[in-house]
Amino acid sequence: MPTPNESPRDSIDLEKEKAAAEPHDPHKKDPNQPWMAFGPRLKHFTWAWYTLTMATGGISTLIAIQPHRFPGLITIGAIFYIVNLFFFAILGACMVLRFTKFPGTFKESVTHEREALFLGPFFLSIATIITGTQKYVVESYEANHPMRGWIVTSMAIAFWVYVFMTFCLASFQYSFLFAKHTYLLTKFMPSWLLPIFPIMLGGTIAAVIAKDQPVSTRMPIIAAGLGCQGLGFTMSIIMYAHYIGRLMQVGYPNREHRGAMFIGVGPPSFTALAFIGMANALEDDFDLQGDGLIDANVLRTLAIVTALFLWVLAMWFFMIAFIAVLHSRPEYFHLGWWAMVFPNSGFIIATINIGNSLKDEVILYVANGLTIAILCMWVFVLYHNIRAVVVQDIMYPGRDEDVED
């Protein structure tokens, strides 16, 4: 209420000045947030949207390798695979509309200190499409089918193209970030791993497609996949040191971004499943030096031992993230919530591979239960994703990954 000596207009101006003086909180909901048409909101359709297809593709691959199957399971997985292709096409169309409708936004998106990190999920989505194609297309053909040879060759070509592109991404994007941006280690987030994540998935792709490849192309794919996995996991280990240091020094991230902490589950999980998958893809008579010392059986044993070592590390990162989210649950949706699906899908796939290698039914039934849990999480996050678009919590100025954190 204005004072006797203050006009209503003076009171309004005073309120505006007071609001302008308050620090802006990008996570605070404005009850008077004005409605905005969908067209202008496309300017804030960021690369982070590919976390949706990254997670959905991971679910389709997870369903394809379930140990205890029932009639219709593969059909369910195929539906996820097709839906993921549909999502990927829709997201691609929206990104093209954004870049054409708002000139200059493409350059801004790939150089932005925060949004540029989410180029990784775009390539991770492609990785899940490749693995899904192997499971639902290649493996659906009989060995003597005339189309199978062409499709198997196409998968090998897709692998090498993917490895080349993701290695370039890891090299050039980090070089640019080192030169143009300054990131404080006290603000370290697992999303800093995203540029190296796609090249690491080269090992996962190799583990999935190698077994169906001819021997002449299989061994180069396994060798390259092992190198890609080594690069990605080694860089992750280096960054884990900064991550733990940040948690020790300043504590958990903002509650709205704690879901992204599950990204830390990914590197050990995908490395574990890649080791087992690539070892199983070796021919039974494989002998590295021809002296009977390092043969396929020895390498498979080493793969299982290493996978168990890494599986527990992944479990530890899972518990750290899980406790952090429970301690202070996010109030508003962010696309980083999809990190609660994709890395954990890799963790479950690693669990299944370990169970199959050890022939342990208990582990496999636990993996079935975890699969049900991650499917529920996928539905939960998808619902909140759609709701956030409707109520303008995302795709709105100041609420997406195209603003500084």
Image (cartoon, grey):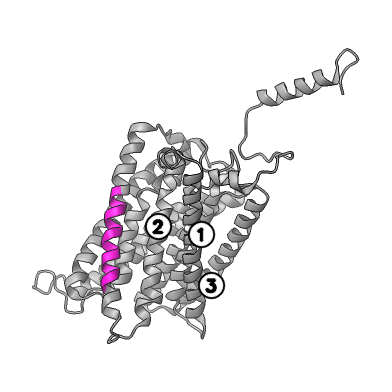
Circles 3 and 1, Cβ within 8 Å, touching? The answer is no
Q: Is residue 75 left or right of residue 325?
A: left
Q: Is residue 68 above or below residue 247?
A: below
**Looking at the image, is mark 1 or mark 2 nearer the viewer?**
1
Q: Position of residue 249 (x, y in %)?
A: 47, 36
- Give the percent coordinates (x, y) of residue 283: 20, 77
Seen at 50% across and 65% down, the residue is 86
| Crowd around label 2: few <14 · some 14–19 · many ≥20 (10 Å) | many
Q: Mark 2 falls on what kind of element? A: helix
Total residue callouts: 3
Secondary structure beneath dot 1 equals helix
**Mark 1, residue position:** 90
Q: Quadrant of the N terminus?
A: top right
Q: Which mark is residue 124?
A: 2
x and y percentages locating residue 91 in the rendered image: 50, 56
- In front of the other: 297 or 286: 286
Q: Earlier in the sequence, mark 2 or mark 3?
A: 2
Q: Is residue 337 left or right of residue 202?
A: right
Asked whether disc 1 touches disc 2, contact meaning CB atoms under 8 Å apart, the reply is: no
Name the residue at 31% across, 53% down: 166
In the image, what residue type sits under mark 2? Leu
- State the residue at coordinates (38%, 71%): 133
Kind of residue at badge 1: Ile
* Stretch in magenta: 153-168
Residue under circle 3? 369
Which comes before the other along the chain, label 3 or label 1?
A: 1
Q: Is residue 155 magenta?
A: yes
Single out the mark in the foreground, 3 or 1.
1
Task: Count residues near mark 1 (Cα–Cα under 10 Å), then give few for <14, some for 14-19, many for 20+.
Answer: few
Q: How far is mark 2 from mark 3, CA to CA? A: 25 Å
| Residue at the extreme top of the image, as rendered | 5
Residue type at mark 3 is Gly
